[in-house]
Amino acid sequence: MKSNQLLGWYEQLLSQSNTMILQAKNGHWEDLIESEMIYLQSVEVILMEQLNDGYASITQKKIHSLLNKLLANENELKCLLSSRMDEIRSQPSAATQ
């Protein structure tokens, strides 16, 4: 796999991650679940391909930057999902009152 192709895959992964955050913020939970499955499959493909090839240090630096953004998105998504779980937990108790 070429370095440019690998960078393109990471950029697509970041785009997918951004979409997932928007889905969570807008309460599109079913869409988020579908996106999460695609996201995880994409991560698996990228990792398998990356293990098979070596890359120049400049490519690795660009990947490092994209990975930092992906991790930030993961943390934001965890917070959004945690808020949703709290919301769901409070609904049954509100209905019984």
Image (cartoon, rainbow, N blue to C red):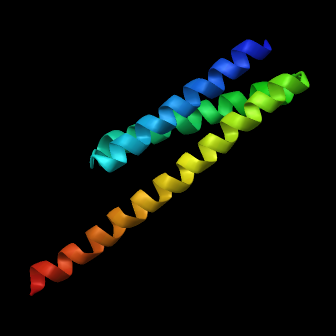
Please report the residue visible at 57 percent of the width from the left and 39 percent of the height from the top. Answer: 40
Please report the residue visible at 54 percent of the width from the left and 47 percent of the height from the top. Answer: 73
- Could you tell me how many numbered marks the image carries? 0
Q: Position of residue 63 (x, y in %)?
A: 74, 31
Residue found farthest to the bottom:
97
Corner quadrant of residue 4: top right
Is residue 71 shown left or right of residue 91?
A: right
Is residue 87 shown left or right of residue 53?
A: left
Please report the residue visible at 14 percent of the width from the left and 80 percent of the height from the top. Answer: 94
Q: Position of residue 19 (x, y in %)?
A: 42, 35
In this view, the residue in front, 12 or 31, is 12
In this view, the residue in front, 87 or 59, is 59
Q: Position of residue 35 (x, y in %)?
A: 43, 36
Give the vertical position of 76 relative to 49 (above or below).
below
Quadrant (top left/top right/bottom left/bottom right) for the C terminus: bottom left
Give the vertical position of 1 relative to 79 (above or below).
above
Give the vertical position of 59 relative to 5 (above or below).
below
Is residue 11 shown left or right of residue 27?
A: right
Quadrant (top left/top right/bottom left/bottom right) for the N terminus: top right
Please report the residue visible at 49 percent of the width from the left and 58 percent of the height from the top. Answer: 78
Q: Position of residue 46 (x, y in %)?
A: 70, 28
